[in-house]
Image (tube, rainbow, N blue to C red):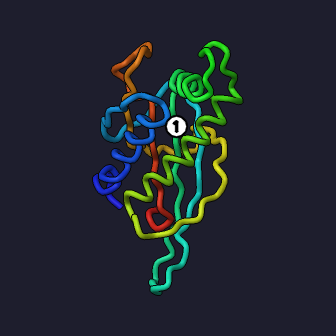
Amino acid sequence: MSGERQAAFLEPAIVQVMETMYFCTPLYCGSASLTGALLGASLPFRELPSLVETNSELSGELRVVMNEELARRMASDFLPADPEDVTHEQMDGTIREFTNIACGAALAKWMPKAEFQFGIPRKMDPEQNNGLSGHCFLVPGGFADEAMPSLSIIFALESDA
């Protein structure tokens, strides 16, 4: 699936989740790779069979990578806690929860009538992205370098591999 087609459903889904849960509006900035101290999570999914038989068995994975500063801020907003008191475990948990909700929101925007089964979000080493660049978002709000994207979403379908 083309990056443009993915962006058409990923962008509004990610903006909606970030605004609702983390009180910020990310700005979509196209396809890129992130740099710096990164944290990540991934969530496998597959479409459940419907009453109407199709020949497709859609499955894939949503991967989320973000810089540590954004992960700390999101955990602080979500828990609520002071940013300096947020632990790496809390950041990892927040990223996994965001990944779960973002995946559900994105799939609902893409295929609103389909039903999906999700795996369990798992911590991911951002190096596992195998050089893939993701759909990047700039999340404004007090970061050291606000011109750099801080969030990357990689939507990988099994058929795209």
Which amino acid lies under the numbered mark 1 shown in the image of this protein? Val
Q: Residue 17 location in percent, x, y?
A: 44, 41
Q: Is residue 8 left or right of residue 75?
A: left
What residue do we see at 37% from left, 39% from top?
15
Compared to residue 56, the image places residue 12 above or below, namely above
What residue do we see at 28% from left, 53% from top?
4
Relative to the observer, which residue lies in front, 21 or 161? 21
Q: Which residue is mark 1?
A: 65
Quick one: SS at disc 1?
strand
Q: Residue 100 location in percent, x, y?
A: 57, 48
Question: In which quadrant of the rendered view does residue 125 lie?
Answer: top right
Q: Residue 71 location in percent, x, y?
A: 56, 27
Residue 37 seen in this snapshot: no
Compared to residue 102, the image places residue 84 above or below, namely above
What residue do we see at 51% from left, 51% from top?
62
Residue 94 seen in this snapshot: yes
